[in-house]
Structures are given as C-alpha cells and as structure tokens.
Image (tube, coloured by chain):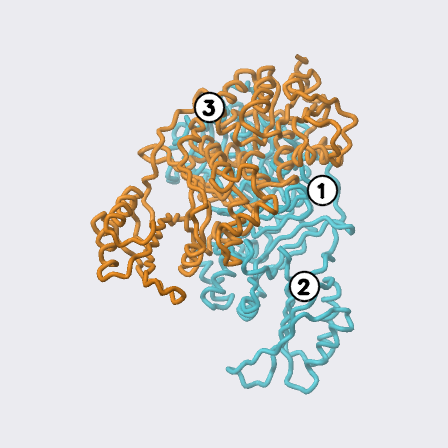
Chain colours: A orange, B cyan
Amino acid sequence: MSPMPSQSDPLRLGIAGLGTVGIGVVKIIQREAALLAARAGRDVVVTAVSARDAGKKRGADLSAYAWELDPVALAKRDDVDVFIEVMGGHEGAAKDATEAALALGKHVVTANKALLAHHGQALAELAEKNGAALRFEAAVAGGIPVIKTLTEGLAGNRIQRVMGVMNGTCNYILTRMQSAGLPYETVFEEARQLGYLEADPNLDVGGIDAGHKLSILASIAFGTRVSFDAVELEGIGNVSIDDINLADDMGYHIKLLGVAQMTGRGLEQRMTPCLVPAESPLGQLQGGTNMVVLEGDAVGQIVMRGAGAGEGPTASAVLGDVIDIARGFRLPVFGIPASQLVQPVAALSATPARYYLRAKLQDKPGALAKVATCLGEAGISIDQMRQINQPDTDDGDAIVLIVTHKAAPADIQHALAQFAATGVLVETPAAIRIEEV
Amino acid sequence: MSPMPSQSDPLRLGIAGLGTVGIGVVKIIQREAALLAARAGRDVVVTAVSARDAGKKRGADLSAYAWELDPVALAKRDDVDVFIEVMGGHEGAAKDATEAALALGKHVVTANKALLAHHGQALAELAEKNGAALRFEAAVAGGIPVIKTLTEGLAGNRIQRVMGVMNGTCNYILTRMQSAGLPYETVFEEARQLGYLEADPNLDVGGIDAGHKLSILASIAFGTRVSFDAVELEGIGNVSIDDINLADDMGYHIKLLGVAQMTGRGLEQRMTPCLVPAESPLGQLQGGTNMVVLEGDAVGQIVMRGAGAGEGPTASAVLGDVIDIARGFRLPVFGIPASQLVQPVAALSATPARYYLRAKLQDKPGALAKVATCLGEAGISIDQMRQINQPDTDDGDAIVLIVTHKAAPADIQHALAQFAATGVLVETPAAIRIEEV
C-alpha cells in the first residue's frame, strides 16, 4: 500500500469501467486539468483503468494509463488513491473491487445504486473502519447533487419527507403515453428500440432501479440502515392510458414517484405510480428528467431537477465526489457514522392519502350503489364520483371513476376486496394514490 | 488567540445579530444537539452572542451564553471558533467584525450578501491568508444550497450560464399583480404593509439585493472577482399590469430574472425584468419562492427551488456551513483561490434575444408603418405584431405589440431611439427581453 498522499500531491484515480460514464470522466479530466486543479487545490490525474476489452475504441486517448483486466487488481494498485467504480452490478467484480479498495483505505467513488442498496451498510462500515471515503453522488438522480444536499447542505434539518422521480425511462414512458395518447405496450416498445431500457427492463419499469435510489436517500435522510427490501415496489406496467387521460382531466399527472417518510409506526418507503397535481413541479416534469423533493423542518421544501442519466451528468456527479476527496473532505458515508445508523422498523404504507379509483362495472341496476356501499363500509368518504360514457363500445359496461377523501391504504385495500365480492366488477379496478406534493 | 482546536473538540460559535436568523440558529442548536453532533462528528455549541439590546425578549433562552455588546469583541473572543454574522449592513460593524475574525484565523459564516458583493475579494484574500473559512450559503437564495452546488457538486463543470429569481418580494409582487390583476403601486403598498419590503424598498424592487446575489454566483461560476458594479440593474417599478397581461396571453410570465454568462466579449451580468415561458420552471414560480438555474457543460441544466428567506430556511443555510466547518471542510471562498480570481471584463449585455415591445401610438395614418420601418432599419425582424383594441378608451391611440426575432440589445435600443424620432409615440415604449430558459 502506498504511503498516505499529502494534500498537495496529485490525486490519482483508477477507473474501473470504460463505458460512457468512465470515458466521460476521462474526457473531462483531460480537457479541464487546470480548472479542476484550481478547484481541488491539487492535480487530479488518471493513472490506471480497467475494462474487459483493451482493444475496443472508446473515444478517448487512454494510452498514458496503465491497464488492468481485473478491477480488483486496479483497486489494489499503489498508484491509485481513488477507485472509481463505474462498471455496475451489485455482486461480483464491482463488489469485490470496491471492498478491496476500501480494505486498503483507498477512497471509492461509485455510480452503483444496486451495490449501495444491497450492501450499503457493510461497505460504509468497511470504509469508516479504514478511514476511506465512499461516495456515490452519481448513483442517485444522475447529475443532481442530491446526496450532497442531504448530507451537507441540509445537515441542520430534521428531514421529514423525501420524494423523487428518479427513473428517466419510466417518466419518459408515462409522459410519452400522455402526449401521444399511446398505450403502455407501444411506448415500452419504442423505449426499448431507443435503447432507453436496461437489459432487464424490469429494473426500470418494475421500479427496482428507482427503488434502489430511494432506499439510499432514505438512509441518509433518516439516519437508518439502507433497507431496500422494505421498499414497497410497484412498477408502471399496469398504468393504463385510460388512467392517464382521466387523471389529466381532473388536473393530475401520473408519475412513478418515490416517497420516504418516518412515521410513528416506522419508516415508510414506497416507489409506486402516484397522481400528483399537474401544476406542481413534479407534475410538470417531462421526459427523462429527474426531480427530487426534500422536506426539512427548518428549510421547508427544496426541489431539485436535472438530468438523471447520460455521460455528462453522471461524469459531473463522479467528478464532484472526486474533487471533494481531493480537497480532503471526509464525512460519514450516510451522513452519520455507520455504527449509529439504526435498523429501521419497516412500516407498510399507512399514511392516509386521497385515492383515485377506476372500476369497470357490469351494466346492472344497483352496481354503482354496491361499489359506493363498499367504500362507506370501509369508512372511506367519496370526494368525486362519476360515470364515464364509452360511446365507442356497446358492451354496456360502465366505467366509474372515484376520487376519495383521505383514507388509509389498508382501508382502500379492504374496500377493493369488497368490490370483488360484489360480483359487479368486469375487471380488476385501478387504485392509485394521490400524493400531496 | 486560542490554540487551534482539534477536530474532536466542540466547535464554538459566536453569533452576532439576534434577529430571526440568529435566533433560528440558536433554537436549532439547542433542539438538535445530538443530531448535529452525529452529523458533524463533534459537538456544536454556542458560547457567546452579540446584539445591541441585551434586555429584549427573543424567544430563545440565551442565559448560558456570554454577551458582547460589540460584535468586534465577540469576533475576537478566545472561546469563539466560528463567528456567525447575521447582523447585515455592508459597512460598519458587520464588516469590522468579519475582518477581525478572519484576521485571527477564525472562521466566518455570514448571511450578508451586500458585504460579499462589495468586499468579497478583500475578505476572501484575508480569509485565505489566515487559513480561515468564509462561508455564505445563507447570503444567496436563502435555504437553497446553491453556493455548495456550484462550488462543490458541479465542480467538474465549466459553468455556462447562471440564472435566478432571487428576490422573493419582487416575485411576490409580480405574481400577485398577475393573479389579482392589480397595478404595481397597489401591490407594492400591500407588500409594504405585509412587512415584505426592506427599510429601503429599492433594495428589493430596484433589484439591488438580487443583484448582490447574482454577482456572488457569477464570481463562483466563472472564476472572476465579484463585480457587483458591473451588474446591469433594472428593477420592477416599470413593469405594468398591461405588460403582465399581454405577456400572459402569449404564454409568458414576467420575472425579475438574474442572468450571468461569460461571452467572448466578457462577463454579462444582468438583473432585469424578463419574459420567460409560462410553462418553464422559472415561469411557474409563484410568490416568494426562489429558483436558481445552473447550466454546466457536463451536467446540463440543474434547477433548484426553495424558500429564499425566513427564519428556518436561512438558519438551515447557516447550519449547513457550520457543519461543513465542524467536519473540517476547507475550500477556497469563491471555489478557486482568491489570488487566481480574474478581474472580469464587464460586458454590456450583447447576447441576442427575442424582445417583447409595447408602444402606444397616435392614431395617425402610417404610424404603425413608421414603427415597423424603424425595426427594419435596425436590422430587427418581427416575429409577431398586433394592434390591441382598447374599447374602454376613446382617445384614439393604438397599442401595438411586437415580438421580435433574436436581436442584439444595442439594436433594440437603437430602434427604440428611432421610434422616438418618428413623433408617433404617445409614451415611452416598453421593451422586455425574452430569456430562453
């Protein structure tokens, strides 16, 4: 292991993964060496890189850097002070190399949300034990410096709620469905052909990727151990164009929205489709852009918006972390020491909300009354209820649209079960939370 | 001077100024001592305070703190590591005490935008010479951590443009004029009675306060010395309800918008009323909320929105800086060392833009043609032109509304001068820049 570098020596980076992000980092370091040095107070240089195929053309001159086929070997190099992990994958090489670097007291900057979501606690403990920084601004909301804002800018606040639209692909699909009036399946296929989807699309549309990000933010916000398994996950695959249009008529847009809040019952984390007011910042968010909303007891509401992915934004986030390390900034991985992070009580979502319900009923006398009765028996008040005409069908079925007053999620689930028991439903009804933002 | 405290000793604060912000800081430190210590890695305590009237009731128990009538004496106390300046005023006691603290190598956290705008370079040099931190997150955009985002989060970027709505009072007045259809004078008076205006209202409505903030952001963004005197300032006093309504009809809202950008001619800084698209984040901004837009070559556009003033948001910003200092974070005051900040070439705004023009013309044959000719001779193309009917007046005058294609500001000024020479103008025309956001 190399001796501890002084604050005036160059900071030497080893970059594992030479996809768009890794190459983006290399290009900025090559182009802006003087500017970065002025900001960091020392030179920031790449000494070594790692990727599987050394022969591939990558759009940057890598000839000055040592090459390691094995990222673990890169992480252990004496001439690497900071290991930059932009390979991806939460097991295998990314994890092994990150652990190897931290064990040697080398700093790590990673864009790997899955790694943090699954192994955040162990990695934080390892980093703090060895006096290494572990930074991951690029893992959440791309170029938006939300980790820094939570751990540093808002460090004087008790955080009350964190919300975010943090998967650009899902937001692209939902806004494109709305603007073009297209069904989910069609837009999903478009997104696939445009290369917007992960190899396993469920990471995007199933809400997993965004759920990883939410679990990381929740840990920092509430001083709890990352608990991705406790995130209530519901993807966008069941969001219908009908719901998007009906919600729009009422002044709402549907977003895949993450919400984390600490309640008297424990930590609620959910990543689910929600209705938000069309005029709100979240409601206005179009396309692949990300947005995070942070609510603190002192500061009130802070909204941050920016690109959630892509070479430049992700490289920007990585370099922000690198320059912090070059400046000598050290803080606990999740804002407070890992030993003090508490295992959260995972609470099923019980915070009441208004709900949007859509049900298709058989055209029988009393069908509507039966549905209304179910709600009343579950203690749920109705704010709006209307029957939608379907002039283009002649099956006689009726669509009924209900907006409830605030109700507990469990009561909504109970009412939906009762709906099914009435025998008047033609298909499973839709129930979407209306989040107050 | 006290010996250098170690990183595990309590960080001792001296707070000069016990208005809402100072008391807000005290209250959070008293209420959240354990949380702040976990985040900072050490205790954060108040040891001494300063205000003119020691007898006044202030809503917090100050009995445990030493009291200094003179803030300079507070700044020099051996038991103060960080001098918190929340008095205001850019000369006199605030400046003297800040200088006294920095000269002794004590860190300073200030909310004083005027102080930074007028004396930023000298104070930064003093701080850096003495190894002291000088932090001022609370001075710009209240609770929004925009200084941190620019100096740290986006440190990997070459910043291209900074924009902001950074005076909540002006934004309140403009949005209230629009929503209530009231003239400027009426809403100004409302704002005065609500206590929204500074003792010298020109600090708000003249754009001076927001201009101070813009000059600070420009320095960080472009590595230049703060040059408030070079900000093109135009307040909101001439924004008419007619312009607000006509702009709204065309899909624009009028904002007091700060823009700083580095051009081939030098640094352009302007704080002026602008039209922005109603659907844009800036256009959507209502009431006293602030918004800052940062554009970097790697990250693209980052938008931040939050409360720009008030006890909680400002105290939040002060505490963010305090905890950074407690954690040992040190970086140059304006992001790069003060000695490397360059004196910017102050460029008059020459970046072309579309313009909104409104002129009241005498009802004479050919009046409209004369105005159009002036534009043509100045090389300005017309995008839209229409005459507004005024059924409620019978003076026969005609209002003509013009939206130009992109034109240089100097050409617009030239055309306006030519308008005057035609002799058909009834009153001075309005010309408002349409900023592409």
Per the model, the C-alpha gap separating discs 1 and 3 is 36 Å
Rendering coords of residue A397 (x, y %): 32, 60
Element at label 2? strand
First-in-chain label (1 vs 3): 3
On screen, residue A189 above or below B422: above
Task: Point out the image quarter for the N terminus of chain B.
Answer: top right
User: 10 Å neighbourhood of mark 2: few (<14), some, or many (≥20)?
Assistant: many
On screen, residue A235 above or below A4: below
Rendering coords of residue B183 (x, y %): 50, 68
First-in-chain label (2 vs 1): 1
Q: Which residue is denoted by mark 1 in the rendering? A: B224
**Pointer 1 and pointer 3: residues touching (CB < 8 Å)?**
no
Rendering coords of residue A74 (x, y %): 67, 20
Rendering coords of residue B126 (x, y %): 67, 32
Per the model, the C-alpha gap separating discs 2 and 1 is 28 Å
Per the model, the C-alpha gap separating discs 2 and 3 is 54 Å
